[in-house]
Image: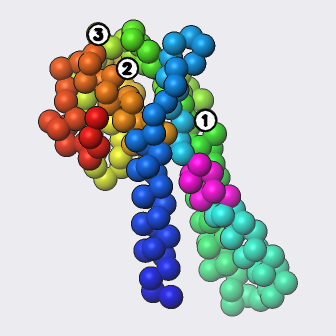
Amino acid sequence: MELILPTITGLLLFYADLQSGKKLRKNLHGQFSLKLNSSYKWTGTVCCLIASFLLSAAISHWNEDIAAMATIVIFTFYGMGIIILVLYYNYELVFDDRKIISTNWKGKKRIIQWTDIENIKFNKTSGYLKLYSKIEKINVLQHSTGFVEFLRKMELKTTFKTEDLRIPFKT
């Protein structure tokens, strides 16, 4: 029982890394499009299903002793599931030879030209690659399908290298 959660987590991370290295094809406009891999959709769905099951159990076995704890646990699972699903369905990063267009979890678009990038930082803990220009900041999620393709383009279009940024992917 103690090995189930670490095993599932390891498998999800392994799958995410495989998807990050996946080759992308250009769309009709000559652009690449990165979306989060499907493990986000399934994780969010499972969290919502667990919350629904717990809600059903709490309603059918309701008493004052479980009221506070049941409410906290149910809202935690629903909250995690909804946040993950919103991120999965809204996040998109589109790039070509001239620019990068990012749509965040709220649906807000940001655009940076490759030539305007002044700094790039990678956060190992969050898995975010942060691109900075004078006006905008864009987050590129490491678990996006085709992330390595973005890294290749970044190395071609900027002076930043994956080794220097300590990004755990080979281009």
> Which mark sits nearer the N-terminus, 2 or 3?
3
Q: Position of residue 27 (x, y in %)?
A: 57, 18
Cβ atoms under marks 1 and 3 closer than 8 Å: no
In this rendered view, identify the residue nearer to me: 56 or 19: 19
Q: Residue at x 47, y 64 (%)?
A: 11
How far is disc 2 from disc 3 in space, using C-alphas? 13 Å
Q: The residue under label 2 is which amino acid type?
A: Glu
Estimate how packed mark 2 is, as few (under 14), some (14 to 19) or many (20 or more) residues with alpha carbons within 10 Å. Answer: few
Q: Over which residues does the magenta segment extend?
A: 38-45
What residue does disc 2 label?
Answer: 136
Query: Please, is residue 96 above or below residue 125 in the view?
Result: above
In this rendered view, identify the residue nearer to me: 21 or 73: 21
The quarter of the displayed image where residue 135 is located: top left
Q: Secondary structure at mark 1?
A: helix
Q: How many marks?
A: 3
Q: Secondary structure at mark 3?
A: helix
> Which mark sits nearer the N-terminus, 2 or 1?
1
Q: Main secondary structure of the magenta part?
A: helix
What residue does disc 3 label?
Answer: 115
Label disc, if present, on residue 90 of the rendered structure: 1
